[in-house]
Every structure is written in C-alpha cells, then in structure tokens.
Amino acid sequence: MRKQSMQFFERLVDAAGPSGDERLPARVWREYTSAFADTRHDTLGSSFAEAVPDGDPKVAVFGHIDEIGLVINHVDDEGYLWFGPLGGWDPEVLVGQRVRILGTGGPVAGVVGKKSRHHQDAADREKPSKLRDLWIDVGAADAKDAAKLIGVGDLAVLEQPLVELANGRIATRAADNRCGAFVAAEAVRLYGDQPGSASRPGPRCNARGSVPSARMSHRSMFFSRSRQNATHCPSGLGHGSATGSFRFGVNSRTFGFSMSDTQRTERGP
C-alpha cells in the first residue's frame, strides 16, 4: 500500500464516529477524496466523491463509516458514568478498556470498571459480566465535577490506537466499517475514469445511509462494501475458512440477487 493511502486509513480509524455521530471520520474521508474527486455531503451525513460526474453509465461504491460505541445514560452522585450499548457488545471485551468520550468540550478519557474479583463471592466469579454492572471512571470527584466534562447522551468509543502485527497485519478499533469507506475512496482514486463512490453512516442502526444514498445518487449500478466476522481464528465458525456476501443493485433498487463466496484462508506460521 502506498504511504499516503496508509496514512489516510490510520486517520480514518482514529477518528471517533460511533453510530449516530459519524461527523469526524466523514470529514477525514471528504478531505482525502477532495484532492482527486468532486466531493460533497448531504443532510443525512452521507459523503460522496465522484471522479467523472458526467460519466455514463454511473456506478457507485458504498462503504460504512460508523463504528460500535457506548452512550452515557446516567451519572451517579460519586461521578461515575453508567452507559448503554451502541451496537452489539460482548461485555467481557469492555472490562478494563480505556474509552474516549465525545464530550461537548472535547474528548474525555475514561476507563471501564467493574466490581473487583476480590469483592465477589464464588458464584459471582463464575458469571459473565453484564453491561448494567459496568461503569466508566473519568476521575471526577462527584456528579457536579463530572458534569463539567460530560453529559447524559454523550457517546463514547474505545481508545484503541492502530498497532502493527506480524506479517503485515494490523489491529485497531473501527477497522470493520472503515475498511468499507477506505475501499470506496481508493476505488475512485485508482479508477479515475469510473463513476463515483460514497461513504454512508449508520448501518448498525438502520438503512438510513445506503438506501437514501442509492436513490439520490441516481446510479445505474451500485456496490455495497461491508465486513464479515473473522472466521480464521480458533473460535471462528468453520475454523480456517471465511464466508462473505455480496449484494447487487440496479437503478437504485436492491434486487433479490446475492452471491456468496467461501474461500480457504490459510493460517500464518
């Protein structure tokens, strides 16, 4: 991958964009595509980049740009924050994680906590964690102090910077959906003589991104790029294989045609 493209991807995954507030990664996406394509956005939050606006037939590539997150729903008297999910979470993943809360005055750092194992009885130690038993500590002295930093309704994401693994692999939060937005942008850059692409918000909540974008863009054909869960790891279904799906649409209507592909993915050494 060329250096500029990797830098773009790193900025894209670093920008916090939980479902419902994808403004930051969308701005990163539009800033990048504006260098080589006609770029704009609509009131729903979808962003568009067109390489050949007057070309025909018109083809669109869609990619999600949001990520799963948390929403603050209560601040107790001691200044601890209680939260609900944005998307499907395994609560065990959240325990001890650092989070970035999108406060009105700017990002606020916090840590997810739960009742200490040393304070649990034997039965509780065997039970899986539940979201309602987890909280976020931002270091506030009390509720009044916490109110200076955050408010009920503020959103949060994990604070997980991109790290490079062996064999050219990476680990980062938000990679699943941002990969789709990245592919859409690079498709326009690499194939400048082809029609446009778009990044859309909100696939985890509803279809408010791709369907309106497809209808409003008046494309003859569109491709939607999304992710699938990794299945090559030891706990994956059909360990050692990966399954994906592909949806095909014509004239801004999704036909009942789909194509599934299963391929063998060999594990590394």
Image (spheres, rainbow, N blue to C red):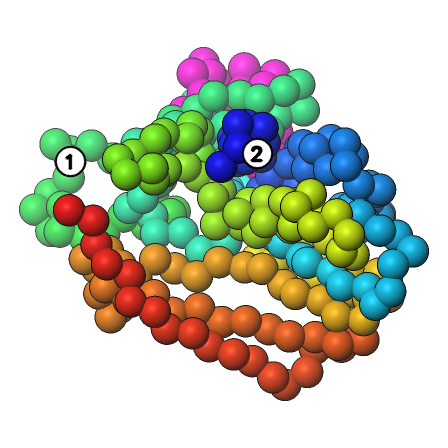
Q: CA distance from mark 1 to mark 2?
A: 44 Å
56 horizontally vs 154: left or right: right
Q: Could you tell me residue 178's position as x and y percent? A: 55, 45
Which residue is at 63% across, 54% downward? 63
Q: Could you tell me residue 134's position as x and y percent? A: 36, 39
Which residue is at 62% across, 25% downward? 103
- SS for callout 1: helix
Between 143 and 196, which is closer to the camera in this rendering? 196
Q: Could you tell me residue 37's position as x and y percent? A: 80, 41
Q: Residues within 10 Å of mark 2 (few under 14, many from 20)?
A: some
Q: Is residue 205 visible?
A: no
Q: Quarter-wise, where is residue 110 in the image? A: top left
Q: Is residue 54 visible?
A: yes
Q: Does the magenta segment cover residue 145?
A: yes
71 horizontally vs 58: left or right: left
Which residue is at 15% across, 46% downward? 269
Which mark is in front, 1 or 2? 2
Q: Could you tell me residue 205's position as x and y percent? A: 61, 58
Question: Above or below — where is 244 with respect to 192?
Answer: below
Precedes in sequence: disc 1 or disc 2: 2
Q: Does the magenta segment cover residue 16?
A: no
Which of the labelled discs sits on residue 5, or is there none? Answer: 2
Give the total of numbered labels: 2
Which residue is at 54% across, 15% downward? 145
Between 177 and 139, which is closer to the camera in this rendering? 177
- SS for callout 2: helix
Callout 1 amino acid: Arg
Q: Residues within 10 Å of mark 1 (few under 14, many from 20)?
A: few
Q: Quarter-wise, where is residue 138 in the image? A: top left
